[in-house]
Image (tube, rainbow, N blue to C red):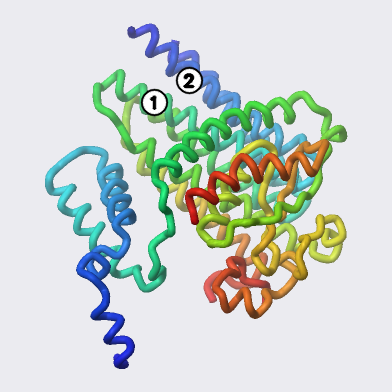
Amino acid sequence: MNFLFEFVISSLIVLGGIFVLVGSIGLIKLPDLMTRLHAPTKATTLGLGGALGASMLYFLWGEGTLSIHEVLISVFLFLTAPVTAHFIAKAHLHLNRDTIRQELSPTGRDHGWSTFDTVPKEAAEAGKAIDQPRG
Amino acid sequence: MTVAGKRIKDERSFMQRWLPHPLLSVVLVLVWMLLLNSFTMGGLVMGMLLGIVIPIITSSFWPERPPIRAYGRAFAFMVLVARDVVVANIHVARLILFKPADQLRTRWVTVPLELTSPEAITVLAGTITMTPGTVSSDLSADGRSLLVHCLDAPDAEEAVLEMKTRYETRLKRIFP
Amino acid sequence: MIEYALVFGFFAVSLALLLNLWRLVAGPTLMDRVLAVDTMVINVIALVILFGIQYTTTTYFEAALLLAMFGFISTVAYCRFVMRGDIIE
């Protein structure tokens, strides 16, 4: 039983470390910002999830108390990672709005992407315009 | 207060007035207990107090309850996403480590949305960001299509179709 | 066994932090640097958690939680500043 616990905790720590490292290697290796964004949002968050799981099991095994702080941290991180990624992507689009506009795929609608185009009146009034346009 | 405002106020039931967001209250109590990291009666009472007061104070920011109907399906969706996150990470890790950067077929794709409620679109965008090689980057100005950046997508149509069938159809059942 | 795993974990996370620092210094664009700082914060949280395991103490979880919140808020604030030239309107 002890061996099993130790094995699981150790492998979680090692896996977490590997994923964190992979995320940072991706940050260095990939060619431009949009591809770099893929590495830290996914790999690093999962790596941290592994470390948190290991810590939870460790305190459950070592002290017999179920420490649930870790759940809170991992839930918080998994909720915020997509938000930061979305914000960084939007800021990137905004900063390069003159050059990047031609690269984007068309919306398939009458209106363009919200970083570049203003929100049409009817959508804004219906409260469906989630992203405010840049003024 | 106008007459119309007063009438609306009278129409609110006891539940709507004191527990505008029951689910938010439950989540707040839970988060408070997790923060304390130990179970005490005083902590529970304090958590319940916060769980009642905070939704009442903030209810003017979001007057409507989130339109979730199928909680069982929502839970199943969360399990599916959690599984996909792990699979996605192994996939992305392989791409990062073993694929030369100039062989990656990165592209922008457009996902036309059938979902209309802001909550559902938010969940879909977050899910897409957390799963295989895709980051949702922008929303069209009328809120009806989503701009997604793919790390390695040989076929744009297929990538869009997978996102739509795997997540959007499920979300459509959760958020009517 | 856990000790060796911890050594590996510390090594991996520290190396990751150095790589992030490289990206932070090298840039080349502003958003690259913001992304590097955001990743650095997450890696520091991992470091704090591993530290907590090594010394068998739960005291550092508050620190990890605060770091998570500040990392998120600072990234969002920075991106908002870039997009709008203002944080609170």
Q: Nearer the viewer, residue C33 or B96?
A: B96
Label 2–label 1 contact, CB within 8 A: yes
Q: Nearer the viewer, residue C47 or B149?
A: B149
Quadrant housing residue B22: bottom left
Taking A105 as reference, is B170 above or below it?
A: above
Compute the Cα span from label 2 to label 1: 8 Å
Say how many tags the image has: 2
Position of the N terminus of chain B, as image quadrant, is bottom left
Sequence-first tag of 2 and 1: 2
Q: Amino acid at mark 2?
A: Leu
| Pointers 2 and 1 within a single chain | yes
The residue sitting at 42% across, 59% down in the picture is: B66
Taking B2 as reference, is B166 above or below it?
A: above
Q: Secondary structure at mark 2?
A: helix
Residue B149 shown left or right of residue B69 in the figure: right
Taking C67 as reference, is C14 above or below it?
A: above
| Image spot of residue B54 (x, y percent) | 29, 63
What crowding class fits label 1: few (fewer than 14 Cα within 10 Å), some (14-19), or many (20 or more)? many
**Mark 2 belongs to chain:** C
Taking B1 as reference, is B70 above or below it?
A: above
Q: Which residue is mark 2?
A: C6
| Image spot of residue A32 (x, y percent) | 79, 45
**Mark 1 belongs to chain:** C
The residue sitting at 47% across, 46% down in the picture is: C68
The residue sitting at 29% across, 42% down in the picture is: B34
Residue C53 circle label: 1
| Image spot of residue B103 (x, y percent) | 86, 32
